[in-house]
Amino acid sequence: MNRTEALRGHAAMLLFSALVAGSFSLGVRAANLIDPAAITVARFVIAAGVLAGITLAIPGRGRPRALIEAPWRYLLLGGAFAGYFVLMFEGLKTAPAVAASAVFTLTPIMAAGFGWLLLNQRMTGHLALALALGGAGALWVIFRGDSAALMRLEIGRGEAIYFIGCALHALYAALVRRLSRNEGPLISSLGTLVAGGILTAVWGWDALVSTDWGQLPAIVWITIFYVAVFASAFTTLLVQYAAMRLPAAKVMAYTYLTPLWVIGLEAALGQGMPGAVMLPGILATVGALALLLKTDEPAVRTSLR
């Protein structure tokens, strides 16, 4: 892979981290204005429509027939993915955007654990060090630099709820590989969104039908379309693009930029900058990013049991 292609991969993941950050800043402003189940169903319907259009426009990008092969796979994938988004918006009702984005940076650590359980993946020492550093930085931000609160594990309700959602997101990442039948990322994502939308609609039917869709504030519709198009369909394509040009460790590394983007967005929206006490945690996540970008070696060694 030549340098130009690698730089394009880095640019794709830089944009990815910024787009994901936008979902936190918008989500925290819309979370208390609509039921989490209702916004998740709307988001899944729109994102599925976008991916279906892309799939039809780009023939040969997967195996559509795989959608009917063991469809129970998509119920598992869709359930985990839907659970992540429902709990994300539930958590954002009380969790600040910066703290929630810091919780999100714990996902690679949890993904490594599920990778070991489901895929027998073994981490290298280099990756373990980077994840530990990033995790420490995330915890510092989550506990707002209060070491006493950290020792007492005084975590906010919103952060705790979103942490469970991130665990489901990490499980989803491992299940995608475990349950794959070579249908291709677009087809797999489409099946996941359709199944997740159905499951969420069944579970949250009362919230779905009781929502007055015509009277929702503009910020809710902006959030729905943003997370559906930019933070879902578009980011899926960016990750696919980058994964073909960068080692897995470098793709994963950009997760750690999300809190920095959120801090910038929140400042631009008039929320001010976080206090200096947050700086050690922010520097630690940047250090984790640098460690993961340092090597071209694969981040994990994998074998299926």
Image: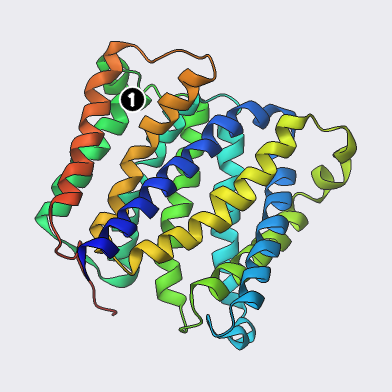
Instruction: Measuring from the top left, give residue 133's x and y in whole percent.
Output: 19, 38
For image coordinates 23% across by 43% down, the residue present is: 289
Q: Position of residue 90 (x, y in %)?
A: 61, 35
Residue 226 pos. (x, y %): 63, 44
Q: Residue at x 24, y 64 (%)?
A: 247
* Residue 1 shown left or right of residue 216 in the figure: left
Between residue 148 and residue 218, name the one nearer to us.
218
Residue extending farthest to the front is 4
Crowding around mark 1 (Cα neighbors within 10 Å: few <14, some 14 to 19, many 20+) is many
Which image quadrant for residue 105?
top left
Quadrant in which the N terminus appears: bottom left
* Quadrant in the picture for the C terminus: bottom left
Decide if residue 122 is on the left or right side of residue 207: left
Question: Residue at (66%, 38%) from the top-left corner?
Answer: 223
- Would residue 70 be visible to someone looking at this image? no
In percent of width and height, residue 184 lies at: 49, 78
Q: Residue drawn at (59%, 72%), measured in percent from left and top?
A: 74
Q: What residue is disc 1 on?
A: 141
4, above or below 19, in the image: below
Q: Is residue 13 left or right of residue 2?
A: right
Badge 1 marks a residue whose secondary structure is helix
Q: Amino acid at mark 1?
A: Val
**What is the tally of numbered marks visible in this picture?**
1
Instruction: Relative to 4, say whether 253 is above or below.
Output: above
Instruction: State the colouring used for the structure image.
Output: rainbow
